[in-house]
């Protein structure tokens, strides 16, 4: 049962990631925590590992369509790598219940922004 649910969760995350450009962690972390009973810390670690092959696959297809801005990606990566390194140690000190709350609040805020924010016009949008 765990194997089947894990594969289905991965499939759902891959589909949503490819369709919407969202990180699979938005789908995988809650599924692992609430369905598989995995701790929040482990779920977030597994999610980060799963991102590597799924992101590479999606990137390949978007690259072929010339839909990747590598300069922006490089600049974002500098901050993202530094932030990930700083937060990795901090997150270990948080109780799982607190980490779960932080994750949930983040998802709610980002979802609200996606629903209610006015879109910005940009000339290069396809």
Image (cartoon, rainbow, N blue to C red):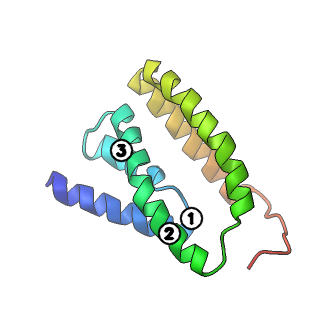
The secondary element bearing badge 3 is classed as: helix
Q: Quick check: 28 left or right of 83? A: left
The residue under the point 54% across, 68% down is 59
| 12 in relation to 61, above or below | above
In the figure, is residue 23 to the left or right of 12?
right
Neighbor class of circle 2 (other Cα within 10 Å; few <14, some 14-19, many 20+) is some
- Which mark, by number, is residue 21? 1
Tell me which label, 1 or 3, sits earlier in the chain.
1
State which tag comes first along the sequence, 3 or 2. 3
Nearer to the camera, 124 or 95: 124
Task: Check whether the beta carbons of the residues at disc 2 and disc 1 lie within 8 A of each other.
Answer: yes
**Residue sitting nearer the eye, 31 or 116:** 31
SS at badge 2: helix
Q: Residue furthest left?
A: 1
The disc label shown at residue 46, or none: 3
The numbered disc on residue 58 is 2
Q: CA distance from mark 2 to mark 1?
A: 9 Å
Q: Is residue 65 above or below residue 24?
A: below
Q: Quadrant of the C terminus?
A: bottom right
Residue 97, disc: none
What's the CA distance linking mark 3 and mark 2?
A: 19 Å
Residue 48: where, in percent of width, then height?
43, 46
Specify whether 37 is left or right of 1: right
């Amino acid at each position: 049962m765990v194997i089947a649910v894990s594969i289905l969760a991965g499939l759902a995350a891959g589909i949503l990631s490819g369709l919407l450009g969202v990180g699979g962690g938005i789908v995988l972390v809650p599924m692992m925590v609430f369905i598989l009973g995995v701790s929040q810390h482990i779920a977030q670690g597994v999610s980060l590992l799963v991102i590597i092959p799924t992101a590479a696959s999606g990137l390949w297809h978007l690259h072929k369509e010339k839909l990747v801005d590598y300069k922006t990606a490089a600049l974002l990566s500098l901050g993202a790598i530094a932030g990930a390194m700083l937060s990795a140690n901090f997150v270990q000190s948080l109780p799982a219940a607190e980490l779960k709350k932080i994750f949930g609040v983040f998802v709610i805020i980002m979802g609200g922004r996606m629903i209610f924010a006015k879109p910005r016009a940009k000339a290069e949008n396809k």
